[in-house]
Structures are given as C-alpha cells and as structure tokens.
Amino acid sequence: FLRGETNELTLPVVQTIVVAAGSILDLQSIQLARMNDRITGTVKKADGTGIADAQVNSWMQEGSNYANTRTDATGAFTLRVVPGEWEVYVAPPSDQSLYSPGENKRVVVRSGIPAQLNFTFGVADSSLIGTLVDANGAALSSVYGYANLYTSQHSDSNFGTPIEHGTFTIA
C-alpha cells in the first residue's frame, strides 16, 4: 500500500513475489505509476439534491491501489486512478441521516476513457439510539465499534454510525 500527498502516484501492478527464507531479494528501482485516469460521478439524495462532503473511497480488487476524495458542494466527485477494475464505496456525512439502497459499485477503467458512477441515498425517517451494557446493566464506556442498520425492503441496504464509549445514535 502506498499513499502520496497528492494522490497522483501509486504502485505499479506487479506479480506476487516469493522470497525464500533467509534470502534477500533486491528489487532495484520501482517506478511508480501516474494516476492519469478518472472515475467521475455524483452523490445525491433521492430528490436529486447533491450531497456535499461525502467520502468517496475506491480500491482495486487486484493489487494495492487505493484512491479517495470528497464530493464538492453539488455532490460531484473525481477520483484519480489507473486503468483496471475498481470498487467504489461512498460514506455520506453522518449528520445527514442518509442510507444507501445498494452495495458498493464496480467499474472498469480503460486508459484515456473516464468512467462514470452515480450514487443515490435515501433519507432515514426513523432513529435508533442505544447504549451497550454488561450483564449488570452498567454502560460499557470502553467499547468502540460500528453499528449498522438494514432496511426491510433491501437486505443489502445499510447505514450506520460509530459506537463511541459504548453509545450510538442512528438517525
């Protein structure tokens, strides 16, 4: 895994290298690949309103390439990538009570041809609040994790929130 300050360079796709126990393999110089290709798209609510500041994450199934960005004020995003198959996941801002009616999306990026993906989120109309407790009913303030909810209409739909100090609110 490699991450630069500008998201312009990444590791090249390489075959698996096996190094025998007790030996040293000198790879010499490794030339990084420039991330010249793009995945563009939008992140919107079901009513068409753009979702600003959503985190857009992507990774390749093969290799260790990763790219991420945030949406602009209109919900638009651009990821700098290299050619190949990418999986893209969007996390909307947690203060907007949004959920995704679908799973991650996959897209194949070809050199010189921008790929397009759009995401639509529903607005939650209910809330769930909870506190994790031990067998005696005492709050577990040292517990951290993540709570997810799934909609009854779509088993692959979910939204959630971090569990901090044993408490969570999904609204």
Image (spheres, rainbow, N blue to C red):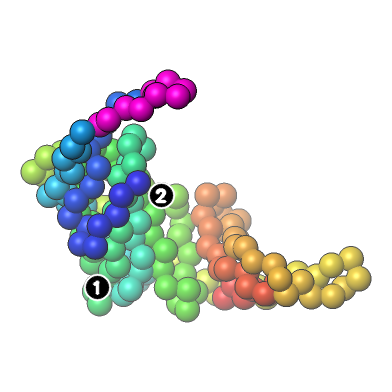
Q: Split into 4 quadrants, where in the image is the C terminus? A: bottom right
Q: Amino acid at mark 1?
A: Asp
Q: Which residues are magenta?
A: 18-27
Looking at the image, which residue sits at the far right? 136
Residue at the image position 52 percent from the left and 49 percent from the top: 156
For mark 2, give the secondary structure.
loop
Up the image or down, 1 lies above or below 124; here it is above
Is residue 39 toward the left or the right of residue 99 in the image? left
Q: Position of residue 24 (x, y in %)?
A: 36, 27
Distance from label 1 to label 2 (Cα)?
A: 20 Å
User: Contact, CB < 8 Å: mark 1 with mark 2?
Assistant: no
Direction from residue 154 to residue 113 in the image, left or right: left
Give the residue at x 28% y 38%: 85
Residue 45 percent location from the top left of the image:
37, 69
Sequence order check: which comes first, mark 1 or mark 2? 1
Of 164 and 169, which appears nearest the observer? 164
Q: Is residue 19 visible?
A: yes
Residue 26 colored in magenta in the image: yes
Question: Which residue occupies 34% across, 42% down?
Answer: 64
- Please state which amino acid type lies under the numbered disc 2: Asn
Q: Position of residue 118 (x, y in %)?
A: 28, 57
- Decide: is 30 above or below 164: above
Residue under circle 1?
72
Quickly name the residue at label 2. Answer: 104
What residue is shown at x 51% (from left), y 55% (from top)? 157
Q: Splitting the image into 4 quarters, where does residue 60 fall?
A: top left
Q: Nearer the viewer, residue 160 or 166?
A: 166
Please, is residue 88 above or below residue 146 in the view? above
Camera-nearest residue between 98 and 147? 147
Q: Quadrant of residue 100?
A: bottom left
- What crowding class fits label 1: few (fewer than 14 Cα within 10 Å), some (14-19), or many (20 or more)? some
What's the magenta bit mostly, secondary-structure-wise?
loop
